[in-house]
Image (tube, coloured by chain):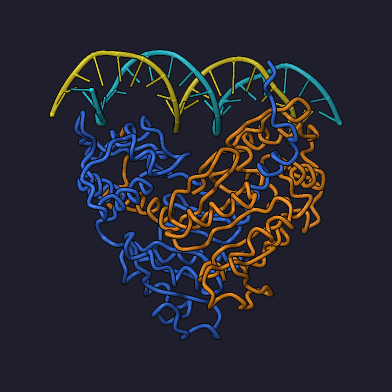
Chain colours: A orange, B blue, C cyan, D yellow
Amino acid sequence: VTERASAGERRRPGSRPGIPDATVARLPLYLRSLHGLADDGVATVSSEELARLVGGGAGSPAKVRKDLSHLGSYGTRGVGYDVAQLLTTISTELGLIRSWPVVLVGVGNLGHALAGYGGFASRGFRIAALLDADPARVGELVGGLRVRPMDDLDGVVREQGGAIGVIATPAEAAQQVCDRLVAAGVRSVLNFAPTALEVPDGVDVRKVDLAVELQILSFHEHRKSSAPAPLEVLA
Amino acid sequence: VTERASAGERRRPGSRPGIPDATVARLPLYLRSLHGLADDGVATVSSEELARLVGGGAGSPAKVRKDLSHLGSYGTRGVGYDVAQLLTTISTELGLIRSWPVVLVGVGNLGHALAGYGGFASRGFRIAALLDADPARVGELVGGLRVRPMDDLDGVVREQGGAIGVIATPAEAAQQVCDRLVAAGVRSVLNFAPTALEVPDGVDVRKVDLAVELQILSFHEHRKSSAPAPLEVLA
DNA sequence: GAGTGTGAACGTCTTCACAGCA
DNA sequence: TGCTGTGAAGACGTTCACACTC
């Protein structure tokens, strides 16, 4: 699900010329596979091996090489890429050297799951605060953090620099919550509520919608079901 | 996050010529907006209005018209599209006339959240079974359903026709669970575990990885932070 | 007049193929 | 010899602009 691309594509003087969106979307996948390799003590990967690791759809050796070449990559011909070096290069490019504070709004079913998700810390994020509009939930201890009232939002965002906002509220509340996040200074939002959010320029929104994913699968499943003849051997 | 496209692109004789993947990915968004309109008693939409409703990134009027034209659409020039008719057309195309059974494997934090998600039924899906490998969890009542042991998988999938599998297990178990789903006859899988899954041809996998989404946001946030000069007024 | 449907232009992403280097 | 780095070709997706219809 995934959707809104970066607004600005600024391309400043000193900075690396823009990395294509499609490449940016794959860098995290490379990162994941590289962590696995590093854990196994592997020192070097070829583009072919890396493509295989990130998995069918997202990986062809040529794609991997093009992607990495955008980072000004340092592969060694005849050998491959240095795993450790690629890890730091990609992490740096993604801004994952520091760990980003995440402000999670909405501590319902999904919010609980997100708060309890272990993979945050190792992937460059830490939950800085849990907020909920429901007074009955405020004060509750979830994943080691106490749920705070919405009024704390401004303070939390300001004391953390440049936090990422995660919206896990019902659809009806999402736009309002988003507005408050943006007003508090948040410029990156991950939205789990099934609604489109309106944001001013300079704010990035990505969204994850479970039902949308299932409906896309449904389309393909439907197609398969209504295609009784798998044979097309003639020609 | 979203990723693997359909394997086969079969394009059989009687069927509609292939709808582009990009369009398929947007149909659920149109559907959502249209439901909203129908609930409000609106009878007709223009491509411009619909584009606005699905939200910034995904909507331009031209895109909407192209997308809908792939469905052999029936808009009325000078007026717009009939909301009710579009609803049924898109629902039919996505295979959402029937409601699809969903088999959810892994009833941890995330599994609980998914099982408790209310939006399933209204969007064309119903949870047919919850499964978990942990004997301690089997028997637990979650979202009105009793958690069943993995051994029930074959039976469940077979008694439901063409179920969609959802994997909400830890990464280590995901491939094994996926293999069992596929062996049982599942051809569409939604994977929440942060791993690439290998599947035979004809099986579609979509994946949702929270950390990947955050890392993509991180990239843009990082860019913004390291771009101190918002002025580029010279030229 | 208003808004769809669509060819044609444009831009982006992917794949190919091969030169070049360890 | 093996694998990277990259122009060039090709596929795909989006945007434009306008003819056509209600």
Image coords of residue B155 (percent x, y): 37, 75
Q: Nearer the viewer, residue D11 or B32?
A: B32
**Quadrant housing residue C4:** top left
**Is B150 drawn above or below residue A79 in the view shown?**
below
Residue depicted at x 42% and y 77%: B143
On the image, which quarter does residue A117 sit in? bottom right
Is A29 situated left or right of C21 in this image? left
**x, y percentage for residue B28?**
37, 49
Q: Is residue B209 left or right of residue A172?
A: right
Q: Give x and y (percent) for residue B23.
A: 38, 39
Percent coordinates x, y for residue B62 in the rendering: 36, 29
Quarter of the picture holding the C terminus of chain B: top right
* Residue A228 shows in this picture: no
The foreground one among A78 and A27 is A27
- Where is D18 relative to B194, above or below? above
Name which quarter of the figure residue A38 lies in.
Answer: bottom right
Tell me how many marks there are.
Answer: 0
Q: Is residue A228 left or right of residue A217?
A: left
Report the residue at 48% width, 57% height from top.
Answer: A174
Q: Residue at x 48, y 67 (%)?
A: B180
Inspect this view and state whether residue A11 appears. Answer: yes
- Residue B162 drawn above or below residue A34: below
In the image as oriented, which residue stretches furthest toward the front? A151
